[in-house]
């Protein structure tokens, strides 16, 4: 789990109606523009208070740790604690639009027979619709293998099907070695079933490679190459065997107009290279239900870049969590739009993985 690096600010009931209204307007304005918000602009924007009264309220919110000032003479911005309070108590979350639903459904179901393509597409979908970097971590495979089968899909490709004891089915497309016959497909399937059934991939991986080396004289050459291709395509359960798929890094440059913004993006790019830490963060999402949100210094990984993560688990039909998918971007992400997008994409991805 990720330990917060700052103390929580006040709760929403501790703010009176005036403070709550001013705070909400500042955060909404900031999320829309990315700019500091001043008392005069709030007064002109419909707050029924004088600029002096608004300044006093802003000062109170600053002392509570909910607002900060980037420069002495500038307006105010929400702190990470302020954003957390807003997201938890004031944010109005909408529904996924019909056009977005159709796009997510059609694009993910088009890759339903190919495990890796579905994960890549899910990350790309979120990147495109949310405007940040889409991330997905491949599943931990801790269930035993029940059945393995190679199904020919023409002269050049085969579908490698692995059924796990928990009911999960994982499909991978593998390019066929030249000269593969139906008997070679059957021989490769039998070889793997005899050695994998009831064991996890990670448990059996070392023994399998040793068995394959010993059995090469007995196995058909193309069957042996099929077994090797299957082992390469299927990951295990250890962190180093799992993939972290990131799409849309270029989106993070869109709002980087100032030098400090470019420095923040550079720091975020470095964060995205920390594969094991990022997988660990996303694995933490597996422990909860629904969408999880991490803002800035709430996680050690993003404490310097001040970024935010919105993520949700994707799971089997029996509600067994496989992995997590989400969006990473600046702290001023469009939370109201992205939260339902991440939730819906995770649910559709789970359906596809069980197809």
Image (cartoon, rainbow, N blue to C red):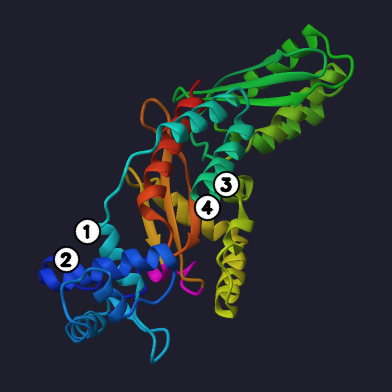
Numbered disc 1: secondary structure: helix
- 99 relative to 76, above or below: above
In magenta stretch: residue 159: no
Pointer 2 local density, CA inside 10 Å: few below 14, some 14–19, many at least 20? some
Which residue in the structure is indicated by mark 3?
Answer: 238
Pointer 1 local density, CA inside 10 Å: few below 14, some 14–19, many at least 20? few
Q: Earlier in the sequence, mark 4 or mark 1?
A: 1
- Could you give the CA–CA distance between mark 4 and mark 2, rounded to whole angstroms? 29 Å
Which residue in the structure is indicated by mark 4?
Answer: 131
- 24 relative to 200, above or below: below
Q: x%, y% of residue 278?
A: 53, 57
Numbered disc 3: secondary structure: loop
Which residue in the structure is indicated by mark 1?
Answer: 89
Q: Which mark is residue 12?
A: 2
**Residue at left offset 50%, top offset 26%:** 352
Stretch in magenta: 296-304
Determine which quarter of the picture holds residue 54.
bottom left
Q: Nearer the viewer, mark 1 or mark 3?
A: 1
Numbered disc 4: secondary structure: loop
Pointer 3 local density, CA inside 10 Å: few below 14, some 14–19, many at least 20? few
Q: Earlier in the sequence, mark 1 or mark 3?
A: 1
Q: Nearer the viewer, mark 4 or mark 2?
A: 4
**Residue at left offset 34%, top offset 80%:** 76
Q: Is residue 302 left or right of residue 48?
A: right
The answer to the question of whether label 4 and label 3 lie on touching residues, with beta carbons closer than 8 A, is no
- Could you give the CA–CA distance between mark 4 and mark 1, rounded to whole angstroms? 24 Å
- Could you give the CA–CA distance between mark 3 and mark 2, rounded to whole angstroms? 42 Å
Nearer the observer, 150 or 192: 150
């Amino acid at each position: 789990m990720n330990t917060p690096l700052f103390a929580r600010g006040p709760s929403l009931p501790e703010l009176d109606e005036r403070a709550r209204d001013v705070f909400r307007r500042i955060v909404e304005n900031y999320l829309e523009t990315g700019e500091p918000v001043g008392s005069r602009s709030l007064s002109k924007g419909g707050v029924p208070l004088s600029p002096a009264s608004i300044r006093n309220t802003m000062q109170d919110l600053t002392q509570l740790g909910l607002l900060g000032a980037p420069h002495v003479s500038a307006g105010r911005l929400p702190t990470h604690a302020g954003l957390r309070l807003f997201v938890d108590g004031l944010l109005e979350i909408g529904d996924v639009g019909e056009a977005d639903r159709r796009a997510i459904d059609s694009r993910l179901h088009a890759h339903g027979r190919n495990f890796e393509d579905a994960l890549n597409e899910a990350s790309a979908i979120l990147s495109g619709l949310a405007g940040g970097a889409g991330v997905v971590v491949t599943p931990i495979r801790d269930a035993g293998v029940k059945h393995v089968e190679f199904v020919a899909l023409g002269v050049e490709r085969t579908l490698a099907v692995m059924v796990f004891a928990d009911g999960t089915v994982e499909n991978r497309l593998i390019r066929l070695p030249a000269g593969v016959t139906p008997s070679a497909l059957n021989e490769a399937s039998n070889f793997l079933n005899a050695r994998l059934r009831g064991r996890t991939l990670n448990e059996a991986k070392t023994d399998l490679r040793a068995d394959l080396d010993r059995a090469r004289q007995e196995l058909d050459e193309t069957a042996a190459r099929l077994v090797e291709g299957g082992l390469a395509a299927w990951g295990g359960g250890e962190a180093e065997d799992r993939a972290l798929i990131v799409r849309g890094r270029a989106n993070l440059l869109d709002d980087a107009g100032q030098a400090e913004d470019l420095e923040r993006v550079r720091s975020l790019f470095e964060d995205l290279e920390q594969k094991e830490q990022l997988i660990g963060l996303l694995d933490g999402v597996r422990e909860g239900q629904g969408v999880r949100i991490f803002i800035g210094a709430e996680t050690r990984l993003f404490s310097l870049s001040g970024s935010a993560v919105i993520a949700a688990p994707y799971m089997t039909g029996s509600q067994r969590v496989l992995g997590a998918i989400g969006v990473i971007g600046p702290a001023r992400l469009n939370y109201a739009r992205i939260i339902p997008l991440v939730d819906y994409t995770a649910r559709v991805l789970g359906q596809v993985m069980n197809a």
